Image (spheres, helix red, strand yellow):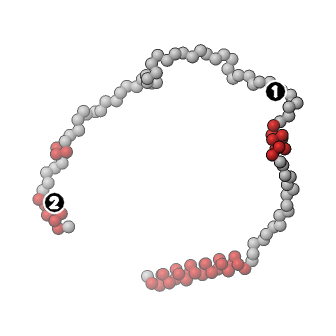
């Protein structure tokens, strides 16, 4: 068992040393990025750009998806259930009592508990 720990430790140390040595040996290439042209925009210029053109042509209003909207029907009972389902009844009305379901205890179980 001790030899297995020694072999594992040597193997892990070798892998860690190899990874550090291989990454440190050659640096990663860095590409030079050229600067991008940037324009500064003042708050008033930005609001003028986003406001839109006052001389733009008016667009037609979109047609409604339906031709006619039906009249709303009054609800007879707002507390009524949406779907009438039959209520589920339990198969048996009463659960049996605890004493009826358990068997009487024997003296052997007391002796076994006392030994533990």
Quadrant where the image shows the N terminus: bottom left
Which x, y percent locates residue 96? 20, 40
* Mark 1 neighbour class, 10 Å CA radius: few under 14, some 14 to 19, many 20 or more: few
- Residue drawn where x is 23% and y is 38% of the image: 95
Question: Left or right: where does residue 52 sit relative to residue 21?
Answer: right
- Residue drawn where x is 88% and y is 30% of the image: 55
Which x, y percent locates residue 86? 37, 25
Quadrant where the image shows the C terminus: bottom left
Pointer 2 residue = 109
| Vertical position of residue 21 compared to residue 56: above or below | below
Name the mark nearer the viewer: 1 or 2.
1
Is residue 31 or residue 45 the one in the foreground? Answer: 45
Circle 2 SS class: helix
> Label 1 vs label 2: CA separation?
90 Å
Is residue 40 or residue 12 the one in the foreground? Answer: 40
* Mark 2 neighbour class, 10 Å CA radius: few under 14, some 14 to 19, many 20 or more: few
Pointer 1 residue = 59
Is residue 48 or residue 113 the one in the foreground? Answer: 48
């Amino acid at each position: 068992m001790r030899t297995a720990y020694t072999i594992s430790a040597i193997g892990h140390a070798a892998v860690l040393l190899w990874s550090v040595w291989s990454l440190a040996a050659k640096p990663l290439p860095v590409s030079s990025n050229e600067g991008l042209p940037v324009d500064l925009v003042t708050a008033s210029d930005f609001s003028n750009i986003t406001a839109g053109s006052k001389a733009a042509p008016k667009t037609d209003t979109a047609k409604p998806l339906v031709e006619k909207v039906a009249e709303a029907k009054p609800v007879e009972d707002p507390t009524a259930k949406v779907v009438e389902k039959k209520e589920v009844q339990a198969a048996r009305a009463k659960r049996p009592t605890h004493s009826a379901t358990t068997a009487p205890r024997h003296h052997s179980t007391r002796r076994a508990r006392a030994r533990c």
